[in-house]
Amino acid sequence: MTAFRLPAVYWRLRQTQSWDSMRSWLPPGLILGSARAVKEIRRCCDSFDGRLFRRNLVCIQTRRVMRLESLRAPDHLIEMAPGLRPGERFARQLPESELRTRLEEILGVRALISYARLVAWRQTGALLDDNQKTVARLTLETVSLLTRPHPVEMGVFLILQPLHGYSAVTRQIQSRFQQSGAGAPTDHPFLIAQPFLPVRPDGYRPAMHFEFQSQTSWAQAFAALGNHLLTVIEANEEGVRRDTDTEFLHDLRVATRRIRALLGQFRPVLTDARIASHRTAFREIGDRTNRLRDLDIQLLNERRYRETLPDDFQSGLNSFFGQLRQERIEIFQDVRRYLHSARYRRLKASWRTFLSRVPDDAADPLPDAIELKDLAHRGLKRLRRRIDQIIGTVGENPSDDHLHQLRIAFKKYRYWIEFFHSLWPAQELSPLRELQDCLGEFNDLVMLQHGLRTFLDRLRPDTPQAVNTASALGALLIRLHDAQNQKRTFVSELISGFVGTA
Amino acid sequence: MRIIGVYHIKGGVGKTAAAVNLAFCAARDRYRTLLCDLDPQGAASFYLRIKPPRKLSGKKLLKAQKTVSRSIRATDFDYLDLLPSDFSFRNLDLLLDQNKKSREKLEAILTPLKDDYDLIFLDCPPNITLVSENVFNASDALLIPLIPTTLSVLTFEKLVQFFQEAGLDQRKLWPFFSMVEKRKRLHQQLLNDLPGQYQQLLESQIPFSADVEKMGLFREPVGVFRPRATAAQAYRTLWQECRRRFGLK
């Protein structure tokens, strides 16, 4: 779809200008109407991992309207539509519009989180030709970034919004502005605000990007990885506590799993007792959050599951999903308490201390001159052997248990490749990701069926409503079972493809 | 993209006022809207204060797609653009006649705009000409302003007959009452009698109003300078009815 508006041109003025003084900057024959100064609070929103910013987009919510703007001309794009209401966080909650479609495409189930607030005193008026026809729109605004304890003045911006069919007059205006002291056009004001933002929208990077050299010692690598993963855990804690987006918990859990995988493969150089104690500690985080994650997945997919049933069956699922929501409230409180607990703090402190003393905690006697590359290769071989071992016992129709074991083995294998990707750049991760995604979806189907069966076992069909619920649950179980079998076949094919790889 | 022609064989029935006001209502609902002023009188362009570009002519319009996109002008209203008229459009019939597939030329010109606009309104000149036949082919619906008078109804029936003979889809014809004066007995009578005869007749009626005539004075849609006027409300209701009939969200 092409943008309906043309790219705006921005100037950051060196000194404050009044609206009336702008008239002297215009080419002859153009009239600038009067304009009232309006205060506008703008919340800049993005997903916690900066999905919009990474695509050069910024989503700005004012009191009533949400705008999506491109930060880089000429790929300008703007969508405007009624925005989120208080308490809403997801693109799917927006009224139906092009904006909603675009945001859903980019953000998926990620919440829109406000990471900066700007206050603008804005005057906007039309530039009219001798026919009193608008040929462009002009905005003069003074922008401040709302930070504590004092706001940061961003400056005065002049914004020219060209209109279709008036490019010649727009060029004249631009040229006059430049001659009159506006200077060269600047970036989008949001990009200028970047250095002042308390949180950068693209500041969070959970992905592993380590450039280890062959001469890097294993202790340096271990400490770097361990510290990065601890940073990821801590970066996500606040998001989990505030419950803004389920992905915070997901990333926190992935980081703890990665730590366990890391510890597991550093056995040759670390003491067994240390490894065991930290692995147990980080497993505890997993255990404490497992149920919350399962509930998140099931509730995020609620609409998808409902839509697999005929319309008149869908209401039968209300009590099941209602119970999940209720359970989530309780479990979430447990998780929040745990993240605030002294036990959790001690766990992290102990890990931090351990990382600072890594060479001292080495196994005794330390194998002579063990190199990182060698250690990494040995770990990779071991993990691959484990996968091959499981695949060897799997027939044409792998059981749920086999697939569960494979899912875990593949995760460890992939984490290990990600840790040391710089040592073997040829390793291709995308087939592994596809396999893992598929195994993950398989597991989600298993977990939901388990939940449905448990709910069904407790259900007493003594009211018409309970009978409706039982029918809907039964129908959904059949759908899920079919989907699970299809997925099983697909996974088997992917595994066959994987067996051939080195 | 939906194309809506606003057409009647007879002149002075409120075609241009309907096209301008309906396009404005659609734009207010954030549909990316283009209003094509095909009438050489250029009344729609006048209402929206837009002068035709110097290089625009009927000949160039039919010859090069680039001419269409370069001639489009933004109006003063968000989401509403206009393809202005030029006096040379009076020769469009002759020019179309020189083209192959002369009855489908307009459709071919508008199709490349499908990614840019959700709705295109065509403000058509009166009479049945080759331009009109192009409009019939290109449009998904033809809004027919019908003054509740014998002559207006008679010409509408001629149009229906033309559609029958030419094998065109009569479901495209969406008549609606325009310039209604309920104090007139003839209007009252036809308002009562006609709905039973025309299945596609829209329920909304546009009253005869001095506010609509004042569009020439203010050079804006009624909804801008008299947003609470009965006529402005009537156009909004008509637009909502069209929107529902199109199944637009």
Image: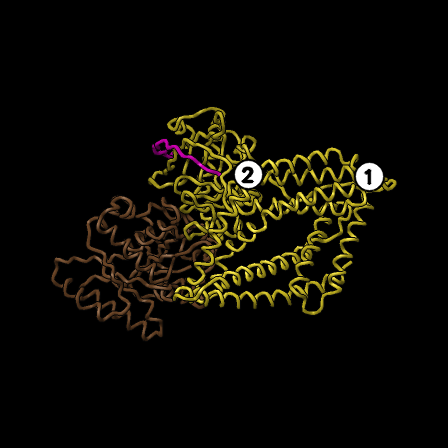
Q: Residue A283 at x, y = what percent?
A: 66, 46
Q: Dot 2: few (<14), some (14–19), or many (≥20) neighbours within 10 Å? A: some
- Can residue A42 be found in the magenta stretch? yes
- Say which element carries label 1: loop
Q: Colour of chain A?
A: yellow
Say whether mark 1 and mark 2 are on the same chain.
yes
Q: Hey, what amino acid is under mark 2?
A: Glu
Q: Residue B30 at x, y = what percent?
A: 39, 50
Give the letter of the chain under mark 2.
A
Residue, disc 1: A215
Q: Which tag, 2 or 1, sits closer to the chain's start? A: 1
Question: Magenta part of the protein: which range?
Answer: A29-44
Residues B142 and A170: in front is B142
Give residue A270's quadrant in the image: top right
Give the letter of the chain under mark 1.
A
Q: Hey, what amino acid is under mark 1?
A: Gln
Residues A215 and A234: in front is A234
Query: In the displayed structure, does residue B51 sit left or right of residue A322?
Result: left
Q: Residue B160 at x, y = what percent?
A: 28, 71
Residues B192 and A52: in front is A52
Residue, disc 2: A238
Give residue A16's quadrant in the image: top left
Q: Residue furthest right?
A: A368
Q: Do callouts 2 and 1 mark residues in contact (Cβ within 8 Å)?
A: no
- Colour brown maps to chain: B
Question: Which quadrant of the rendered structure holds the C terminus of chain A?
Answer: bottom right
Indicate whether A410 appears above or below A21.
below
